[in-house]
Amino acid sequence: MTNSPDERGAELRELFFETSQELLQALNDEALKLEKKPGDEEIVRVIRRTVHTLKGDSAACGLRELSELAHQFEDALSLEGTATQAAVAEIAFAAADVFTEMIAAYHRGGKLPSTRALSKKIQDLTAAPATGKTRRTRKVMGKGKTSAGVANTVELWSEYEKLAMLQAQASGQDVYHVVVKIDPHCAMPIAGRQLVQNAIAVMGPVLAVRPDAKSPAASKQAELVIASVQTAEQITAKCKIPTIAGEITVELMLSAAEKQAQSETASPVEASSGETAASAEVPAEAPAAMPSAEAIATPTTQENILRVDAGRIDSVLNLVGELIIGKSMLQQALNEFSKRYPKELLRGKFADAMAFQARVLNDLQRSVMKIRMVPVDQLFRRFPRMVRDVSRQCGREVELDISGQDTDLDKGILDAISEPLTHLVRNAVSHGIEPADERRKLGKKPEGTIRLNAYHHGNQVVVEVTDDGRGIDTQKIRAKAIELGMTTVEESAHLSETEILDFIFRPGFSTAEQVTEVSGRGVGMDVVQTVLHRLKASISVETRPGQGTTFRLKLPLTLAIIKALLFWVEQRLYAIPLNAVLEIARTFETEVHQVDNYEVLQLRNQVLPLLRLGRPVNDADRKSKLFVLVITVGERKYGLIVDALEGEEELVIKALDDHTFQTDLVSGASILGDGRVVLILNLPAVVEHVARSRPTELGQSNSGLLLTHTDRTRLAMTPAVGGQA
């Protein structure tokens, strides 16, 4: 059953909304290159091709306003002398912004933005070339025939038309350029033009027609490109229609005989060169050799790429997750079977089948995860334009250096960190990089540098934002924190540099002296940390006064399936990512000490801050043994006190409904093979909870109570979502 036209149109639009983002990004990239190399005609040609594609695709989807605006810009870029104008890059940036807004409006069904300002800039660009210069002309190359060439004002041939010309030549047909002037005394010029076109079509396939039938110029002339085995004289005779056709010009563009001669006499390399020369004969404007007809028939790597909606991949991933739960259930049943029937011969066959299933399931899981992985370049490539705009807005000179853009990351995580990373880069420009004059006085080069880098580190991806600016003044941070009531003078005296820097992630904290469009409102950095906590990620800061600052984001490779360590606290089962665990230590409660009302443990000549999920022990239990999980969060180590260990397990993370569970200390849940529900702790949020908690009474430590009474009540209710407690 075929889809209705409306359904096909909707699918076409959705495809356009997806692919247009690549075109807009390419437009921004080329505009940045043109800004650095003003007057580069090759870059202008690339911009024109990008706009041409956007015009055609939007027209095919019925997006008339966008298509017309793109057509107007494309026409302006085709004018003689346009490429040398400095305004082209600025207009390209403006066009990219307006196109983006228009596509977003089309997508959500909202009101289109005003295009008047952009149209005015394009018109100014059109009027700017020197007097006497008209639209770029094309000289049709023939073999020394009647006319030296025809200068005309029609649009340039499209890439598809050029390819059709080459294919016709390769098939043994000559390609002719035909221009027929319509008799000015013709009573019905449009109908006459159609009669001319019909007559020419008898001589061979028509490959291109100019101008468009709806154009005012259509009543004056018809310009066609045809492929034919007939001679130019025969085509001219066919076009002579009394009272309709006036002046007629027929010129040979591509010769089949010449093509054949080149193929017979040239080596493979020379034949390729000859084909390039033939390609150059079509439009003089072509930026490079057109691909041959044989090349068109050869499948390219692009044909092996499928665009798949992310929701479909998520569905497959969810099914893989269910299979993993099923594998755990089978393993649990096999273990019970082995205990009950230790001498049963079928145990070995069951074990072999389970091992085979586990291998296949692991391969399937890795394959699906690789499908979800995309290079961080998809995010990084947005920043050159943004840095350029923000630096101009702030009066800075900034260069962006990008590395590690091929590092793969889960698509869901990549989308989620877009806003936090954008804020960090904007802050680096507005807060980090000094003005050019100030940098000169400090002996630095006037142009600051911001570096974006990404790399794999174990089972994590690290993304760094580094600037070579003034660094962060920790004393200023301390003073501002005291002013905002976030700490006291006495407390701040005992804070380390890392703890002082943590204040910048508090809600409402800002050291900007005035509010601007870029900074100073006291929002942003707390949102950065909130988003990262939600992703089970962490952020750390390194700064050197006068030398610069680095923000380091540590992200999980995926949010769907993790290797976890399970443990018990107060008869409840919890889990944490296995890659966060450095080691497991055994100690006694008597080895736990109080320092500034916080619990610490001395482990191999280092003092380890402790995190306690349960209640503090009483004096009667001071001699009891306990487990301490040494974990890393950001760049620091902590000891997590637990009652007992359950073991390692591969967990499929299930998101928790906010109505069911309302604490950020837990990032998700999972179901074990025996039906039990395990809660997965959000370690960055747990550490943040400790950092913000304060003793309520001198000499009494409540910092160990990470889960308040309300938190523990919510945790107790959670297994209601399924399984046993």
Image (cartoon, rainbow, N blue to C red):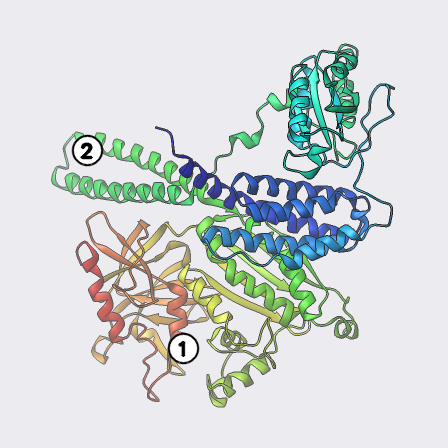
Q: Is residue 88 above or below residue 139?
A: below
Q: Quadrant of residue 687?
A: bottom left
Position of residue 344 measured from the top left corner of the image (x, y, whole percent): 14, 32
- Please state which of residues 521 and 139 is positioned toward the viewer in this rendering: 139
User: To which residue does mark 2 refer?
Assistant: 347
Q: Residues within 10 Å of mark 1 (few under 14, many from 20)?
A: few
Evaluate whether residue 406 shows in this view: no
- Amino acid, disc 1: Arg
Position of residue 68 measured from the top left corner of the image (x, y, whole percent): 62, 46
**Left or right of residue 511: residue 91:** right
Q: Quadrant of residue 544?
A: bottom right
Position of residue 440 measured from the top left corner of the image (x, y, whole percent): 79, 72
Say whether disc 2 or disc 1 marks the residue closer to the N-terminus.
2
Position of residue 147 measured from the top left corner of the image (x, y, whole percent): 86, 23
User: To which residue does mark 1 refer?
Assistant: 692
- Please state which of residues 59 and 561 is positioned toward the viewer in this rendering: 59
The CA span between labels 2 and 1 is 53 Å
- Amino acid, disc 2: Arg
> Which residue appears at 72% of the width and 15% of the height?
238
